[in-house]
Image (tube, rainbow, N blue to C red):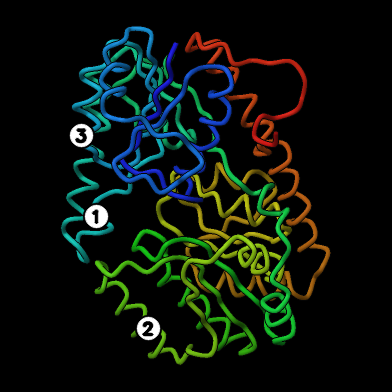
Amino acid sequence: MNILIMSPTVLQHDAVGNDIEAMYKIISPRFPCMVFAESKINKHVEYIDEQLLNEWLDDPSTVVIYHHSIYWHTGELLLKSVKGRIIFKYHNITPASFFQDYFGPYAKLCELGRHQTEQLQLLFPISLWLADSIFNAQDLKHTNQENVEVCPPFHRIETIDQWDMDNQIYSEIKDGGNINLLFVGRVAPNKGHLQLLEILHNIKINYTSNVKLRVIGKFDENLRGYNEIIKDKIGEYRLKKNVEFIGEINEKSLVSYYKGSDFFVCTSEHEGFCVPIIEAQYFGLPVLTISSSAVDETIGSQQLILDNDVRQFTAAIELLTSKREYKDYLIENGHINFNQRFRVEIIENQFRRIMTEHAQIPLMKKGRNSDLHE
């Protein structure tokens, strides 16, 4: 049996790339396993060449695990030539409406991708689908629900905690005399940055000016209109000293920002899972978020989900700052959520069980040591 993992792009340390890398590390010790991608950024997996790709696709014993997160014309064509079985991992696709006013090609790509989600279900009606969340699984209406399993995405949270902090970054955050808010996510219209600025402005006007929001995530030059609105809003509200867009950073720096901050604030309007929420919980940050898409599911119970109202966020931050026991309650239950649902060992066991019981790929093993830590 050969296992071929497919995705248009395999990045280093993004949610889909981490998921692919982890699957590869679990499967490759047991079966021949390779990855096909058009953009090969992650160097921790082995990529297949064109000749072997054609041989594997023509082999009935090959199992394809197809990661679906965006429209991919080439991928659909290749799937139609597969002689063996196909398993889909569905990471969700952002609705086109979020990008329509800013960059038409992205909106079109999202529209095509969501349509392709339906088409793939119809083209391969007996295939197994793995969804990152129950929210994602709701998109799979054209698939027999007996063939749908929820399996959270693999992550590197426990691994990055092994990195030493950047002490300079940590000290600058802690010694600044501010209430430190953090959000992690690319700068895109569905991520809710404008609402974060509204919250920041309300805190500054009605509670304290000693507050700073740091946003970790890459700007996209194709979204200039959205970026300009953010810049204008910062100027209008005079938030230049209160907000910092940091861009992409390494894992050592990321740990420092998580450990140095006081709150993780999320107003994202569309998430298929939202890994940064469980990162924040792991690192002991109380999470304040709105009810949205998969966020309610990911954050777990006994956590703070607010209305999309800046006054509620300001009041919550004021209360949690003054009442340490309330803040500790959120931190404790955030740890419980992570430890009971999203430790790598738990996700790995779930993935192994699904592959063994539902995909007839025997991956169960004895003992508790994870392949991802070997």
Name the spot of residue 199 as percent of width and height, x first.
Answer: 51, 75
Q: Which residue is mark 1?
A: 97
Residue type marked 2: Lys
Name the N-terminal-most of marks 1 and 3: 3
Q: Quadrant of residue 69?
A: top left
Name the spot of residue 243 as percent of width and height, x first.
Answer: 51, 82
Q: Quadrant where the N terminus lies?
A: top left
Name the N-terminal-most of marks 2 and 3: 3
Q: Quadrant of residue 62?
A: top left
Bin the neighbour count of mark 1 within 10 Å (Cα to Cα): few under 14, some 14-19, many 20 and up. Answer: some
Residue at x-position 36% and y-position 59%: 190
The disc placed on residue 74 is 3
* Front-most of residues 251 and 50: 50
Q: Which residue is mark 2?
A: 233
Q: CA distance from mark 2 to mark 3?
A: 40 Å
Residue type marked 1: Ser
